[in-house]
Amino acid sequence: MHNFEEELTCPICYSIFEDPRVLPCSHTFCRNCLENILQASGNFYIWRPLRIPLKCPNCRSITEIAPTGIESLPVNFALRAIIEKYQQEDHPDIVTCPEHYRQPLNVYCLLDKKLVCGHCLTIGQHHGHPIDDLQSAYLKEKDTPQKLLEQLTDTHWTDLTHLIEKLKEQKSHSEKMIQGDKEAVLQYFKELNDTLEQKKKSFLTALCDVGNLINQEYTPQIERMKEIREQQLELMALTISLQEESPLKFLEKVDDVRQHVQILKQGPLPEVQPVEIYPRVSKILKEEWSRTEIGQIKNVLIPKMKISPKRMSCSWPDEGTDK
């Protein structure tokens, strides 16, 4: 405890003096502390009811208190003034009680092993607990850190160090396993993606090939039909123009036109050849590939697609049906 603070502390309650009263022996105590002592000792002196003896807690000298009680003792005004000034100032180097305003932590509670103030001992939760002054408590606990260090450096902590190293090794091993699994996942799905990409390209190539077959099948037919259509239109134009010719020119050309029309009609029309594509990719994907195990996809062959013409002949309408 700070030396100056000791001078302001009541030796009975260990708190900053409250209403300090001075005894004839010059020792000062809180009024409440003296009243408690007087009340405890007054019953033993019933033969002198007008004067109550009070033994000083410090020097043990006897003081006879008037019937008015402790109030009759003089106030230590000098000390009270010092206390009032002290309490108005800030004292950052002095630790005060968090529960009792401006009361210094100047006593050590032996039961709870903590610093307390005088109010904690008299009216607080440490009332009646065994106590010790700070210097004495410090000397008793001074060797504690060394003992704790010895406890913290014995074989128990050596085992803990080994355990930490072992846990680190296991952690590192587990992390390597996880990293290996990550790489395996990446490699697996890369290979799977490569396989799927290759199968996709193979399917698209097969579809392009069958598309070329379709083009080869239909394009010549379309071109032939266009040629016949052009011949038809030319003959229609020529036939219409005959109506404007003179009789001489008409007779010269009409038979020639008639022969060309007959020749064009007698020639068979190209066959309309609808084709069937087989096998159908959409059906294969839905019925076969959807049931294929992922690991077997690379072994599944891409079918070669073909076209199968369904020939349907077409000809000019029968002349007997012309109207």
Image (tube, rainbow, N blue to C red):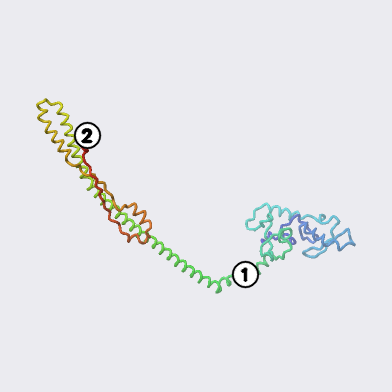
Residue occupying the point 22% across, 34% down? 322
Query: Left or right: 90 with respect to 157?
Result: right
Residue 259 appears anywhere in the view: yes
Quadrant assignment, res 7? bottom right
Q: Please tell me the numbered disc located at residue 322.
A: 2
Identify the amino acid type marked 2: Asp
Quadrant assignment, res 14? bottom right
x, y percentage for residue 261?
A: 16, 35
Distance from the alpha carbon under mark 2 to that under mark 1: 129 Å
x, y percentage for residue 114?
A: 66, 63
Q: Which residue is mark 1?
A: 144
Above or below for 236 versus 269: above
Element on which disc 2 rests: loop
Quadrant assignment, res 111? bottom right
Query: Left or right: 4 with respect to 59?
Result: left
Identify the amino acid type marked 1: Thr
Query: Left or right: 2 with respect to 200?
Result: right
